[in-house]
Amino acid sequence: VSLADPVVFSNFGAGFSYNIISGNFAGNDFGGDVAAEGDTFTPASSLNFSSLNIALSCFVTGLCPDNFTVALNQDNGGVPGVALESFTVTGGSLGAFGSSNAPLVLTSILKPLLTAGTAYWVTVSADANDSVVWNWNSTGDPSIEAFSPDAGTSWFALGFTPGAYQVNATSATISDTPEPSTFVLLAPMMLLLLGLRNFRVGVWNRLNGHHHAK
Amino acid sequence: VIFAADAGPAQFTSSGNITSGSNIITNIPSTAILQVRWSVSGSGIPNGSVITSVDSPTQVHINSNATATAAGDTISWGAVFSPPTQLFDFNPTTNMIGPLTTPIPDTNLRNIPAYPTRMLTLPNGQLLFSDSSSQLWVYAPDGVPNPTLRPVINGVTYNGGGVFTLTGLRLNGQSAGAAYGDDDQMDSNYPIVRMTSATGNVYYARTTNWSKVGVDGGASSETVNFTLNPAITPGNYSLVVSGAGIASFPTAINITAGEVAGQ
């Protein structure tokens, strides 16, 4: 994370501190669920997503053998919706739960635009072989937390404590890829400019005796 | 849902003929709803008599011989505290009560009334059932609790001296648990803390100082103190809190050696 990168949302304490001894499960929670967790945030200004810091750990060393998924999701009526960008994380890379592990840093490739005033979700999901823990925040974040007992198929906002994470953005807004309708509006103008340029080049060539190569 | 047992077959009356010294009742207008072990009473029928067999649409056998002869007198069948005992299942989705799909193979039930039986909701969502003999039965309902009704764990803090405080929602569950009429209240509407290790060992913790005893706590924050099970060792645990048989979704918690030692 660059020093210049604006922080869109963070519930970390000072020095990226978080609750080391408690957290929400993703994957096998030893209660018969294949859990997934989601925490929501709402940007105050429109910025492009650049990276995510997230406090994840492995419940017990060796119990996170598979890859799992961290994602940035759209909102779907108060619970996580379609993923805007997903990150595949190697379970074996996680530190053991109960230790002060450095938060994971996941860097965006797609850099989707986060629109001011719109709710988004960060989700963590894992399969039944993994027991990933999303450590709780330690700053009293009152944001809504969503839980899924079936690996993200169904979501419930039950009042869980949110995990610790930080959403970072690029310092400059990157325009979205224009919609086809935008191309339709721009095309006549571009053709006009191209025609004007060719006209000017043709006049210049004729005045200076130049010819286009055939 | 309150699991309860405090009833018997609704009393049913009919006419019938009996002969002194015989254990057969004849000329009953209909035996369609009569069941073996229902109580039978009427003139000439000894106290404590029950049906031993339903022979035909008009005749039954009872377990004792009549002391008088009567024809067309009123005979009472069944009633509260009459055997047998039958177990029913309530489906909250359909709001219907019906006999258990797979009855427990308890042969005592056909011979006993409901009143000696007792139920207790367990923290894992199962139901412990006693027919007052030395044999206990466990009923495991299908399905899972409504997620929005389950307790929630929001925080666990260590206070020192081996005492933790758990903060959360709906810690007492949604009902008192089980009851037998006005005679026995097998309440379990209080927080029960369960910790499961990664190897599957389960430890229950003693809870005290409940901040609330009401059920259906909604979105109001509640607290409960707990002390660790003496058999627990330092490590990571999947922690749930259960109220009246409805358990929270698990939370991961790390228990240190100092906490186990009560420091």
Image (cartoon, grey):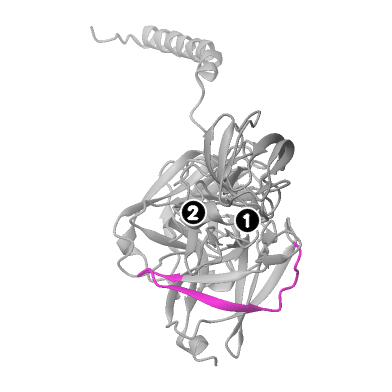
Task: Using residue B154 as the reference point, say whether residue B211 is left or right of it.
Answer: right
Instruction: Look at the image and say whether residue B163 sits in the magenta stretch.
Output: no
Residue B3, x across and y down, in percent:
64, 55
Residue A8, x across and y down, in percent:
59, 53
The answer to whether residue B77 is visible is yes
Indicate whether B256 appears above or below A15: below
Indicate whether B232 appears above or below A174: below
Residue A98's quadrant in the figure? bottom left
Residue B166, x across and y down, in percent:
63, 73
Q: Secondary structure at mark 1?
A: loop
Q: Are marks 2 and 1 on the same chain?
A: yes
Write the residue at 43% across / 82% down. B234
Q: Which mark is residue B49?
A: none
Write the residue at 70% across / 66% down. B184
Indicate whether A122 appears above or below B119: above
Give the label, 2 or 1, closer to the camera. Answer: 1
Magenta stretch in the rendered image: B196-214
Per the image, the residue denoted by label 1 is B114
Type of amino acid under label 1: Ala
